[in-house]
Amino acid sequence: SQTIHQWPATLVQPVGSPLSLECTVEGTSNPNLYWYRQAAGRGLQLLFYSVGIGQISSEVPQNLSASRPQDRQFILSSKKLLLSDSGFYLCAWSVTFRGPYNEQFFGPGTRLTVL
Amino acid sequence: KQEVTQIPAALSVPEGENLVLNCSFTDSAIYNLQWFRQDPGKGLTSLLLIQSSQREQTSGRLNASLDKSSGRSTLYIAASQPGDSATYLCAVRLTNAGKSTFGDGTTLTVKP
């Protein structure tokens, strides 16, 4: 069976510090990978998605970046955090060529607080 | 640009009641629509996925319908239980490998 891991689960960082959040998927190959951010009481905002190693699409201009160094690893980074970067960060995966068609599965999330 | 709206934002019902959650979207050329449940502080759990060629999907007490022409989906929950209390989100995908657009969710409270 497939599982998705995110770490850390919670993180408190000062403004201006760097950030690295990691997401890994087990039990599948060549997944589509996604990073979302959820502000308090709101829906999900797609930040980045990737259809393969080294292929990253950015949806929202910001001081965040994403990388996919391995097939099942997706990393969200920042060189200098802003207060507005606080939120709940969720990683998700889906596959293209297997039913159910492109169902998305989410990780447990990382709660980031920037002080 | 696809926009997804969920109304109401919050709903409170007594235990045992049947209820309907609504999701509307502006671009009817969708690939699929997915309903999720989110408990406080947790990730999203997939409930039902409806492909664009389907009109409904069922899982236990849950039934999701899709009407592309009117840009609407509903999630029907039968015989609600306190354990159903959570936020329910719908997500619409336009293409096979592309992104999904999420609604802001409906927060459901089922009172014992």
Image (cartoon, rainbow, N blue to C red):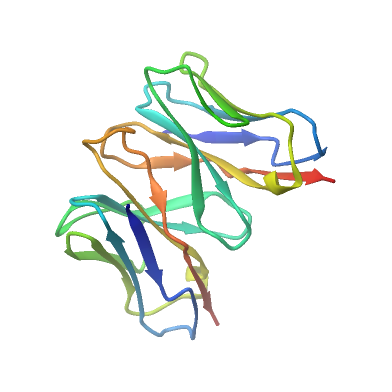
**Image quarter of the C terminus of chain A:** bottom right
Count of numbered labels shown in the rendering: 0
On screen, A26 above or below A98?
Answer: below
Q: Residue furthest top?
A: B69
Height in image: A87 above or below A113?
above
State the residue in front, A54 or B87: B87
The residue located at (61%, 60%) in the rendering is: A40
Q: In the figure, residue A62 lies in which quadrant? A: bottom left
B39 shown above or below B8 = below
Q: Residue at the location (46% across, 59% down)? A: A37
Specify whether A34 is left or right of B87.
left
For this view, does B17 lie left or right of residue A82?
right
Q: Residue at x 36, y 82 (%)?
A: A18
* x, y percent for residue B16: 80, 34
Name the one closer to the observer, A115 or B35. B35
- Which sits in the foreground, B84 or B91? B84
Task: Give coordinates of residue B99: x percent, y percent.
Answer: 34, 42
Residue at 47%, 16% in the rendered image: B55
User: Where on the picture, by quarter, is residue A99?
Assistant: top left
Percent across and percent down for residue A79 are 32, 79
Determine whether, in the image, residue B20 is placed left or right of residue B65.
Answer: right
x, y (%) of residue A5?
37, 65
**Which quadrant would residue A26 be assigned to in this image?**
bottom left
Image-based side of A92 in relation to B21, left or right: left
